[in-house]
Amino acid sequence: MSIWEYANPKKFMQTSSWALPFVTVGAVACLAVGLFWGFFLTPEATNFGSTVKVIYVHVPSAMMAINIWVMMLVTSLIWLIRRHHVSALAAKAAAPIGMVMTLIALITGAIWGQPMWGTWWEWDPRLTSFLILFLFYLGYMALWEAIDDPDTAADLTGVLCLVGSVFALLSRYAVNFWNQGLHQGATLSLDKKENISDVYWFPLLLCIAGFVLLFVTLLLLRTRTEIRQRRLQALEQRERMA
Amino acid sequence: MIALLTRDLRLAIRAGGGFGLGLAFFLIVVTLVPFGVGPEGGVLARIAPGILWLGALLACLLSLDRIFALDFEDGSLDLLATAPIPLEGVVSVKAVAHWITTGLPLVLAAPVFGVLLHLPQAAYFWLVVSLALGTPALSVLGTFGAALTVGLKRGGLLLSLLVLPLYVPTLIFGAELVRRGANGMDTQVPLLMLAGITAACIAVVPFASAAAIRVNLR
Amino acid sequence: MPQAAPMLRVENLAVTRGGLPVLEGLGFTLEAGQALVLRGPNGIGKTTLLRTLAGLQPALAGTISMPPETMAYAAHADGLKSTLTVTENLSFWAAVYGTGAIDAALDRMNLRQLADRPAHSLSAGQKRRLGLARLLVTGRPVWVLDEPTVSLDAASVALFAGAVRAHLAQGGAALMATHIDLGLSEATVLDLAPFKARPPELGGIAGSFDEAFA
């Protein structure tokens, strides 16, 4: 059995309807336990205060923001090369989720950064990169919206995703370079993994798992909607022809 | 291909304002900035590299939606797509024509505008170099954006939304090059990065643009 | 050069418009010296078929075989630049196709007196004539024409028919979609109505996403 079988819309609908309850329950469970553990059962860090707990939302959403774009890149490539409609629709379905994840990461970043750096916004390379990523999501979604023919839209957004990925990566390095002179260690190291102890680490892992499952749940739901919408279009068109 | 280039340039001249419009827009931006930030020379000199680059970028953006739209409307694009020139060649020529009509005048006129913004002496050379190296990338990427939105009724705003994020690396390295040049710092890294991005864009992006045109003509 | 093979052979072709099959099972050949006129009601897919043949859109099924670089396509729109003169417009296409000479085309389509006029000052019929003169400068043997006689008066239609006849006499071929009679006695008429795509449940070919979504 090949993985491409799931590229058949019918097969995808069957499998996803079977899988949806499990991932939904998994997402809810992981998020509930992880967030509760993280928010209420971890000790307050002496030098960070309670604001540090925003990492239980901030880190997973930031990871997902990037991973979702990568997933869109992969599905776009699959569409462009193998012409599986489900793949293109999955990319379309993932974009708004990714955009919201980016927004969450930016907002929680601001909430965290305010007490840490004394400012809501800092042109820190990471924050700036996320802002640029947000713009890429906006452009990608706007292009989907603007084009009527679904196959044309899938092709063009696929090409945009490809080119955009290269430039998003390039922007990341450009932004790093751009701000190196201004910052020079003035801000706190954002690399959490190095200065985080196990007490905080386990609930964080659980939250990350929760966000991944949440994304899968939403993605399945949205892709199913897109497939249904597409089928509706096909039926309408066929009726018009008959 | 040369016939296409001469035709496009001739069209730009005949249509009036092909060359002038971008420059006039550039001038307006440069004029308006001091009204916004105040006439103080020190402040202007400090932000001049960024303003000049932003102005160049916006002036470039201004004429992007016309790159393919006119040819699409009157049917020439269909005919060009069936002509013995590869579509990749067509989009490259279009980008060159766009650069000659908007990028090149900006490169040449930028020092004059630099005077208006009190650009430091040392920066003029780097301003011209950075614009000469960077604006071709703006035209090529703009052609890609125009190719994506060619069939759309109101593609102009969407075009800006699609293209501007792609301009980020060029803008960063371009403005940084001028800034470093103005302060007498080492310019090698931004110079090489800027040139590298432009070279890579010229080499690769036309393929994406041609693919987008093919999809849009379907 | 004597050619045994037809200049254009179409076999079992199916074309789509907006992802939906419009024509299927279409097959014909075009020999040197032959003109084929496509007939059919509006919306049957004449333009779609011609665009597919011109390579502007992919065929859903079937094969189109012709020697490379033999086709010149003329669409509804003439692709004229209104600020360029007649000569400039024509020279551009001559340069693109690498033929260069435009004098014969100017004379053939009776554009000599208009040669230095900018295209925007031409009437609709004159523009159309200029658009057809473009075909002459391409030097390609197979003409694929979409409604070539729109906005032409009787005299110009005759002029055009004469140009087609001369083209056929030189061993060219023409495929055109048109509603009016060109007076080309040698033209074969192909009615597209029998090739209208049937719904899939009646055995018709499935569209690009029909089969996956139904």
Image (spheres, coloured by chain):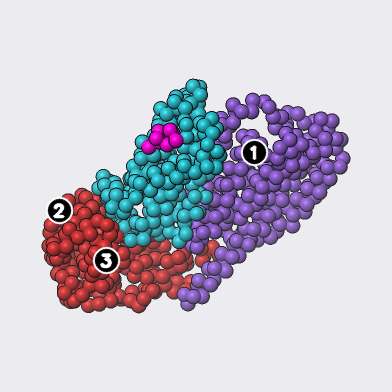
Chain colours: A purple, B cyan, C red
**Magenta region, mostly helix, strand or loop?**
helix
- The quadrant in which the C terminus of chain B is found is bottom left
The disc numbered 2 marks a residue on which chain? C
Q: Nearer the viewer, residue B101 or A93?
A: B101
Looking at the rendered structure, whether the residues under marks 3 and 1 are on a common chain is answered as: no
Which numbered disc covers residue C145? 3
**Of the two numbered discs 3 and 2 in the rendering, the one whose residue sits closer to the viewer:** 2
Q: Quadrant of residue B200?
A: top left
A186 sits left or right of A164 in the view: right
* Residue of label 2: C101
B123 sits left or right of A64 in the view: left
Could you give the CA–CA distance between mark 3 and mark 2, rounded to whole angstroms? 22 Å
Mark 2 is on which residue type? Ala
Q: Quadrant of residue C132?
A: bottom left
Which numbered disc covers residue A237? none
The residue depicted at 47 percent of the width and 27 percent of the height is B120
Looking at the rendered structure, whether the residues under marks 2 and 1 are on a common chain is answered as: no
Where is A36 relative to A92, above or below?
above
Looking at the rendered structure, whether the residues under marks 3 and 2 are on a common chain is answered as: yes
The residue depicted at 47 percent of the width and 55 percent of the height is B156
For residue C155: magenta? no
**Of the two numbered discs 3 and 1 in the rendering, the one whose residue sits closer to the viewer:** 1
Where is C143 relative to B133, above or below?
below
Which numbered disc covers residue A127? 1
Mark 1 is on which residue type? Leu
Q: Is residue B201 visible?
A: yes
The disc numbered 1 marks a residue on which chain? A
- Total numbered labels placed on residues in the image: 3
Task: Give the residues drawn in magenta, as a range.
Answer: B109-116
- Residue B190 appears at what percent x and percent y? 48, 28
Mark 3 is on which residue type? Leu
**Of the two numbered discs 2 and 1 in the rendering, the one whose residue sits closer to the viewer:** 1
